[in-house]
Amino acid sequence: MVSLSQVRAAESLGDYCHFFRLYLEAPGHARYVMDTFADRARLDAIKVLLKGYAPSVPLAFMTRNLGFDNDVQCAYFLEDHGCVLGSEKSAVDCKASRPLLVDYSIAVKQEEERKAAQRKEERIAIEF
């Protein structure tokens, strides 16, 4: 059984291996509770992995260490946060990814910018 204190300890100590082991073993809906911490822990883990493994890291290794169910989900998350994948999407280019990594979702930010531009166009000038 996974306790919240174990999750918080692993997350606060930066022990992403232990955190994602707990995440994958979490019973029932406990995994949904842990999702609140998962993205931040993934981004911290990505920073460590990009510094530690060069010139590239296999995508399967990243999938396993970041607690994803499959490579497709992992690849989407990595690309959405600025990581550069190889031509066959089988490895992450560490050197190219390090300066491009961002803490926010690029897709969400682009959608917010698109909606803001759309709201700006919809404004009607009021004349008196």
Image: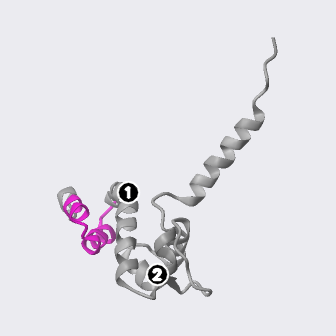
The residue labelled by disc 2 is: 94
56 in relation to 65, above or below = below
Judging depth in this view, the residue of 70 and 74 nearest the camera is 74
Colour treatment of the image: one colour
Query: Relative to 22, is 74 on the left or the right?
Result: right
The percent coordinates of residue 28 (x first, y second) are: 33, 61
Q: Residue furthest top?
A: 128
Magenta: predominant secondary structure element?
helix
What residue sits 45% from the left and 85% below the top?
A: 60
Q: Position of residue 103 (x, y in %)?
A: 45, 60
Question: Is 17 inside the magenta-drawn segment?
Answer: yes
User: Disc 2 and disc 1: Cα gap in Å?
Assistant: 30 Å
Q: Which residues are magenta?
A: 7-28
Q: Is residue 96 above or below residue 11?
A: below
Q: Hey, what amino acid is under mark 2?
A: Cys
Q: The residue under label 1 is which amino acid type? A: Tyr
Nearer to me, 102 or 79: 102
In terms of image quadrants, where is residue 11?
bottom left
Q: Position of residue 34 (x, y in %)?
A: 33, 58
Q: Is 95 placed left or right of 15 in the picture?
A: right
